[in-house]
């Protein structure tokens, strides 16, 4: 777990460095001032982050077609979430149902007090209670680690880099005037490759957080095999019945990618390979005996071999 946090921090350092560099290029080529470009890029990023931070849960629920439900409307989902939340030291999040038979789930919200756990109608249909607990433990791990906030920050930075790079390209091609041509191609190449690099870093952060949520959720629940079994079913069903609501841009929200993509697109997936996730969970299982009614010290003891 410590390595996962270190890796995420390192990736954020790189994406912030890219942001600073591209902001400087904007200032140099559009405003003849490196500092002016950095300030403008920073302002853009702050606006995007502000909007995403405060409105993320509403935007996500609206765009996915999810509807908020009460415990009386979704008793099975509410029962499991209410049982699991204290194990993650969380208050029980709000609940939502996505009206699609594609089995999947996601969590959203800037913190535990504004969190929402959403499940599709399909996932409630195909998973038994043990498997559903594994999935919901994964989603609660995301809330506990504030992954929604982290990924929002990464996505808005990547978006700001892309917008800034477009300004650099436009200024380089049409606004150079009497400017020297010596570094023109280098700057143009940097402006083209920076957004690609930012996107790849964003995807790497997303995959790292998925692995961590798998681990934290499985260990806190005390049953890695439950999530492994659920992931196998979800991967098969999502390939057979891809989601028809929402946008592929939202794929990082879900526990498995619900949208059909080509083999080439899989290289840019927001999720690690499901087979590898299952392999890691099964390796955890070999060091962890499933004891569903044991809490506290047993869970802490189970964490130690998983860190080695």
Image (spheres, rainbow, N blue to C red):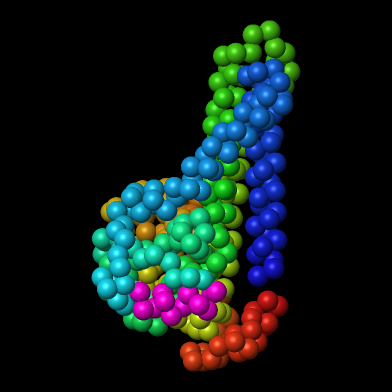
In the rendered image of this protein, does residue 307 appear above or below residue 197? below
Q: Can residue 47 be seen in this view?
A: yes
Magenta span: 78-89
In depth, the one of 256 and 38 nearer the eye is 38
Q: Residue at x 72, y 26 (%)?
A: 35
Q: Position of residue 175 (x, y in %)?
A: 60, 13
Outermost residue, top side: 178
Main SS of the magenta segment?
helix
Horizontal side of residue 126 vs 192, given as left or right: left
Q: Which residue is drawn at 39% across and 51% down?
A: 58
Q: Position of residue 129 (x, y in %)?
A: 36, 82
In depth, the one of 71 and 280 nearer the eye is 71
Q: Position of residue 80 (x, y in %)?
A: 39, 78
Horizontal side of residue 268 vs 67, given as left or right: right
On the image, which quarter does residue 166 sit in? Answer: top right
Horizontal side of residue 43 vs 97, given as left or right: right
Q: Does the magenta stretch include residue 87?
A: yes
Q: Residue at x 34, y 49 (%)?
A: 63
> Where the N terminus falls, by quadrant?
bottom right
> Where the C terminus falls, by quadrant?
bottom right
Q: Which residue is drawn at 57% across and 25% down?
A: 167
Q: Where is residue 134 in the image (x, y as percent from the top left)?
A: 45, 77
């Amino acid at each position: 777990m410590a390595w996962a946090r270190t890796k995420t921090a390192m990736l954020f350092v790189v994406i912030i460095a890219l942001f600073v560099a591209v902001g400087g290029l904007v200032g140099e080529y559009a405003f003849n001032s490196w500092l002016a470009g950095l300030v403008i890029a920073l302002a853009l990023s702050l606006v995007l982050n502000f909007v995403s931070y405060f409105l993320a849960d509403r935007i996500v629920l609206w765009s996915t077609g999810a509807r908020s439900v009460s415990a009386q409307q979704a008793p099975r989902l509410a029962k499991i979430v209410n049982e699991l939340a204290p194990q993650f030291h969380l208050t029980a999040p709000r609940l939502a149902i996505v009206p699609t038979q594609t089995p999947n789930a996601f969590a959203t919200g800037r913190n535990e007090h504004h969190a929402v756990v959403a499940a599709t109608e399909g996932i409630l249909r195909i998973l038994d209670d043990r498997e559903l607990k594994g999935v919901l433990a994964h989603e609660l791990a995301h809330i506990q680690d504030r992954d929604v906030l982290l990924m929002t920050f990464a996505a808005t930075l990547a978006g700001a880099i892309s917008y800034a790079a477009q300004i650099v390209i436009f200024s380089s091609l049409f606004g150079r005037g009497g400017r020297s041509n010596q570094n023109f191609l280098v700057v143009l190449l940097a402006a083209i490759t920076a957004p690609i690099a930012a996107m790849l870093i964003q995807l790497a952060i997303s995959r790292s957080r998925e692995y961590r949520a798998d681990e934290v959720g499985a260990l806190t629940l005390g049953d890695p095999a439950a999530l492994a079994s659920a992931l196998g079913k979800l991967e098969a069903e999502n390939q057979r019945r891809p989601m028809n609501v929402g946008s592929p841009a939202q794929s990082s929200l879900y526990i498995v990618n619900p949208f059909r993509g080509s083999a080439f697109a899989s290289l840019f997936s927001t999720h690690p390979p499901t087979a590898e996730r299952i392999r890691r969970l099964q390796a955890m299982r070999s060091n962890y005996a499933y004891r569903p009614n044991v809490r506290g010290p047993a869970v802490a003891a189970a964490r130690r071999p998983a860190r080695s």
